[in-house]
Amino acid sequence: MAEPKKPKGKIRRALEKIVAGAVLLHAGTQLSYLANDLYHSARPSAVRVAFEQEFGIPLKGWASDIENKPQQITAITEALREEKTEGDLHINTIRVESPNYLKKSIDEQFYQIFTFGYSGLCIPGSGNAEIKINARDAGDIQRTVHHEAKHAKAFAVMRAHPEFLERWDALSRDGEGNSLYHVPNRLYHPPFRPIFSWLPGLHNIVQDDRSQSPTHYENLGFVSPYAMTDIDEDIAETGASAEGFVLDCLPSSRAPISDTLRKKYRLAEEYGLVPQEYNSMLNLQDLARAAWGSDQVTDATIVDSFIRSSQAFLEEHPGSRWEQDVLGTRGTLIYNLPKTVEFGQFRLIAIVDFETLLRSKPGCDYLLLEALERLHTSTGNSDAASMYTGVRLRYLAEMRSLGSQEANQNCKAALLQ
């Protein structure tokens, strides 16, 4: 008499079928992934051709994430243009990942199942690095591209200048010489980084404390809690933070940049990881905020110092990405000086700065028109003041009746007459 089949045998066969099905499914996704790369390599779209012509880097991914997402590609392009002005990108591929699990590579599928994921990834090699972009929002994409591009540049710097790592590490230690990183000595390094930072459980080993106040980590010489993870993330975070800098003269509740962090910025500038004029911009920021006081411009002497320093900056760095910031801040400081201050010569500088800004903008700016009207009035140029009054009032009326696009076109045309 035959023995009844054991339940364990049925379970095993069921599991075998599930495993076989999963293997076939994933094999199919990888064939599809490879076929997509081969197709777009053989027949690249105009978007991919233009991208590779501009940067010398192939743009890889699915059409649904590249050709069908022009805003995302614009964000990547703008960030890379800024990075390119600072030197070689040291990138061999940019890949835009798909949010669709079935359109991912096997390693991307692994990360999606077993880890917390990532917005971007820089994979170093013996030469240039590959960058993967997994962010979706345009602002997040730009920040991610800058961060990963700094990784790629830093890996190239480390290969060419081994002393760079030692000099940076020396700035990330406490008074007793202990490392301030959560994972010192670069143990947290590819391919181990995914294991440490993304896997549940192990993630807590290097979890940064995002509840820290900016004063705490900035005083230690870091731009963010995440920068304290390890030396690689510190370099990338510090470099990327310079890209989003905007010069202004308004008082800030944030503490001044610590001496240690300034030393890191200077070291990054020395090795081409931030714009060459970045530290000069930080000095201008200090002057601008010192001149402003608590709620208004209070020190004409500092404004005078800012004017001289900003002019030297513009002459030393023609075409700087921060040129408009400098002009706007300088004009704003002069425009807001107390009426009791004799600053006739300053007014002429503000007029030139504001008119330069107005010409450089794609549309008009109501506040600039109003400021120029008042500045010309204060210098006794009634004709110019009257012209700006007329343009300003017409611009305001047409914004209400015709809409932004036509009002801006008419305003720019009136200024050219």
Image: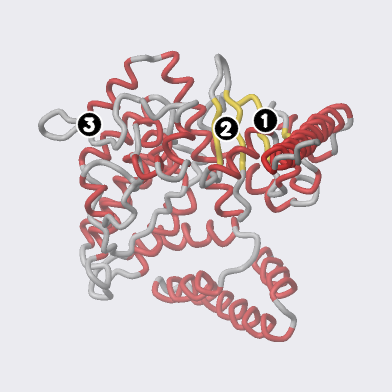
Q: Which residue is mark 3?
A: 179
Residue 77, disc: none
Task: Say how the picture is coloured.
Answer: secondary structure
Residue type, label 2:
Lys
Q: Are marks 3 and 1 in contact (CB under 8 Å)?
A: no
Real-space CA distance between mark 1 and mark 2, rounded to the nearest whole angstrom:
8 Å
Q: Are marks 1 and 2 in contact (CB under 8 Å)?
A: yes
Classify mark 1: helix, strand or loop.
helix
Q: Is residue 148 visible?
A: yes
Q: Is residue 210 left or right of residue 411?
A: left
Residue 224 x, y percent position in the rendering? 34, 47
Q: Which residue is mark 1?
A: 55
Within 10 Å of disc 1 (Cα), the crowding (few <14, some 14-19, many 20+) is: some
Residue type, label 1:
Phe
Foreground: disc 2 or disc 3: 3
Measured along the vertical axis of the image, is residue 101 above or below residue 183? below
Measured along the vertical axis of the image, is residue 60 above or below residue 378? above
Within 10 Å of disc 3 (Cα), the crowding (few <14, some 14-19, many 20+) is: some
Residue type, label 3:
Ser
Residue 285 x, y percent position in the rendering? 32, 52
Which residue is pictured at 67% across the width and 36% down the height? Answer: 95
Place residue 400 in its image quadrant. bottom right
Q: Residue furthest front?
A: 1
Residue 84, disc: 2
Real-space CA distance between mark 3 and mark 1, rounded to the nearest whole angstrom:
38 Å
Towards the viewer: 206 or 114: 114
Q: Is residue 316 visible?
A: no
